[in-house]
Amino acid sequence: MPLLSQREVLNLKLSCIPLPQLRMLALDLCVSNKGKATDIIKRIWESQPDEQIINEFIKKRYAEKIQERRENISDEDLKKS
């Protein structure tokens, strides 16, 4: 038996997404992006989304954040640490 249910895992994933990005995800899933994060998460969950779409959205945002960090930190800065 898994430690967390599918719903709990999806809730954790969605809860970790900042509100501005959560609003973008809601639009991608054709769900209303109005209201508080908890309201948006509830609507996303109720729409029974393909979890693969959510996973890809999270991976894409993570890759963007890594790229932004790489642009801000040079190799020389890393060698000094």
Image (spheres, helix red, strand yellow):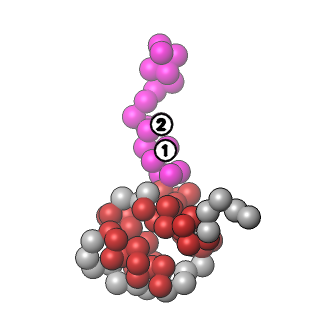
Q: Is residue 64 magenta?
A: yes
Viewer-side residue, 2 vs 41: 2
36 with respect to 41 (left or right) = left
Which residue lies at the image location 54% right of the left edge and 67% below the top edge? Answer: 8
Q: Name the quadrant containing residue 43.
A: bottom left
Which residue lies at the image location 52% right of the left edge and 16% below the top edge? Answer: 79
Mark 1 is on which residue type? Gln
In the rendered view, tell whether residue 64 sits above or below residue 1.
Answer: above
Which residues are the magenta region? Answer: 62-81
Residue 47 at x, y = what percent?
49, 86
In the rendered view, tell whether residue 4 sits above or below residue 52.
Answer: above
Viewer-side residue, 46 vs 64: 46
Q: Quadrant of the N terminus?
A: bottom right
Residue farthest to the top? 80
Residue 39 at x, y = what percent?
33, 76
Q: CA distance from mark 1 to mark 2?
A: 5 Å
Q: Is residue 2 magenta?
A: no
Which residue lies at the image location 54% right of the left edge and 84% below the top edge? Answer: 48
Pointers 1 and 2 in contact (CB under 8 A)?
yes
- The rendered magenta stretch, by its main secondary structure, is classed as helix
Viewer-side residue, 7 vs 79: 7
Task: Check disc 2 and report the residue beneath it.
Answer: 70
Residue farthest to the front? 1
Callout 2 environment at 10 Å: few (<14), some (14 to 19), or many (20+)? few
Mark 2 is on which residue type? Arg
Q: Is residue 39 visible?
A: yes
6 with respect to 47 (left or right) = right
Task: Check disc 1 and report the residue beneath it.
Answer: 67
37 with respect to 50 (left or right) = left
Which residue lies at the image location 70% right of the left edge and 62% below the top edge? Answer: 2
Residue 25 at x, y = what percent?
43, 72
Callout 1 environment at 10 Å: few (<14), some (14 to 19), or many (20+)? few
